Amino acid sequence: MSDCFRLTSPGPLQRPLEGSVDVGGAKNSALKLMAATLLAPGHSEISNVPDILDVHVMAQLLEQLGCTVSVTHPSPEETLRGSGTVAIEVPEDLHPVAPYDLVRRLRASICVLGPLVARCGTARVALPGGDNIGSRGLDMHIRGLEELGAAVRVEHGMVVAEAPGGLTGANLWLDFPSVGATENLVTAAVLAPGRTLVDNVAREPEIVDLCEMLVEMGAQIDGIGSSTLTVEGVERLEPARHTTVGDRIVAGTWTFAVALAGGDVTVDGASVRHFEIAADKLVAAGAQIDQLANGFRVRCDRRLDAFDVVTLPYPGFPTDLQPFAMALAAVARGTSMITENVFEARFMFAQELARLGADLRTDGHHAVVRGIERLSGAPVVAHDIRAGAALVLAGLAAEGTTTVADAHHIDRGYPHFVEVLASLGADIARVPGD
Ligand code: UD1
């Protein structure tokens, strides 16, 4: 039975959060960096990798493919940052089959597809599982690989890609700036002879991080951080030695925590520029955020004003911070409108938030949230990483005790979540589920 997180609060602004938080590397970058090491035989090392289950699942997957992997993390007694190092020994000959029992536990495992086809000319990767936040198609991954010269089919629950003569550079475009498709196509193209131009790519800081690591490995990529990437294929890449970019979603999470509870917290290790639209919304609503050399400081001493949010690919408002915005809107002064454009099922969270007393209504991908003064603690269930964390934070603005079941979802995105929140002064504990 999965643990619960139990949080007790006197209500918003009654027990402000104080102190500092050290944010480690981004989950959504580290997992892709690990997959990309497959592109070069030899010893690669990725540092600032978060201490979360998904990293261990990705390590097991790489071992299944023929690598030797060692994951080292400091103990929470040493630091709550929860970031360590992953060393990966990549063999000359990989076994390009990613089985369902590992892939279903981790959506990001689809990111081995591009590197495997590039290195081996063939790959069989089970269709992924991951969060319960929507259908999460693979059509753009598949069409892009086909345009690079692979024959791709889906059979018996596996994506099977074959390019016996290797891939070749091509001009591609994405219907939508998909993060995963961009990653797979860039990692497939770096070893493909000729020029690949991919238009309408995702521009998330995690994509920039991946491209920068590939360049350090010897890849030739132009346009990093823009909507068009141009890749000039090279014959061989060198092993990687790279530090993962700070986790902007974790940093954003602690920013919303202060907005919900009140307080004064310094966040180190991640840039506020990486979630600027969300930060600007909070400032416009009445919070104070100041950039610092290695992070930022967030302060809040009053009930915030209502605000509207529309989720969009980067640099738009991140869908991964949308549940936190909805939790905050529930106690803001006035009525907020939230539009979810990226993952249709993310509003499952609204039903749980309503259990805490939130006054909201959803219609398709829009939600109208009428702010009330305080929520009231209740038992609720985490359906995915961000919804789970947002329910705990909603508990900061609720009077009484909020118990969030299925907290293993939260552990998947946040190293030492309970300990960090407790270090800021929240009354929170991990308790066994019933
Ligand atoms: C990644 C992140 C996730 C984040 C999301 C958007 C990881 C492990 N996860 O997910 O936390 O919320 O980016 O910032 O990095 N789609 C298709 N066909 C495709 C590919 C995507 O229809 O071939 C759709 C998806 O169903 C979804 C939307 O496009 O509705 C966005 O997906 P995408 O950007 O690919 O997100 P992920 O890489 O899955």
Image (spheres, helix red, strand yellow):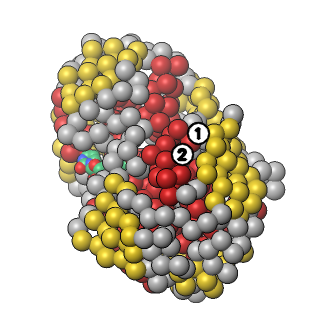
Q: Left or right: where does residue 97 sit relative to residue 68? A: left
The nearer-to-camera label among 1 and 2 is 1
Residue 15, above or below 300: below
Q: Is residue 88 visible?
A: yes
Which residue lies at the image location 43% right of the left edge and 34% below the top edge? 207
| x then y, percent, for residue 94 | 43, 32
Assign the N terminus to one quadrant of the image.
Answer: bottom right
Q: Is mark 1 within 8 Å of ligand 1?
A: no
Q: Quadrant of residue 424?
A: bottom right
Q: Left or right: where does residue 69 sit relative to residue 73? A: left
| x then y, percent, for residue 196 | 27, 20
Which residue lies at the image location 49% right of the left edge and 24% below the top edge? 212
Which residue lies at the image location 70% right of the left edge and 54% below the top edge? 265
Mark with earlier residue (1, 2): 2
Q: Is residue 105 visible?
A: no
Which residue lies at the image location 28% right of the left edge and 55% below the top edge? 341
Assign the C terminus to one quadrant of the image.
Answer: bottom right
Tag 1 secondary structure = loop
In space, the residues marked 1 and 2 are separated at their CA atoms by: 7 Å
Residue 149, above or below 400: above
For disc 2, the marked residue is 248
Residue 381, above or below 298: below
Amino acid marked by disc 1:
Ser
Q: Are marks 1 and 2 in contact (CB under 8 Å)?
A: yes
In this view, the residue in front, 306 or 6, is 306
Mark 1 surroundings within 10 Å by alpha-carbon count, few (fewer than 14), some (14 through 19), many (20 or more)? many
Amino acid marked by disc 2:
Arg
For disc 1, the marked residue is 271
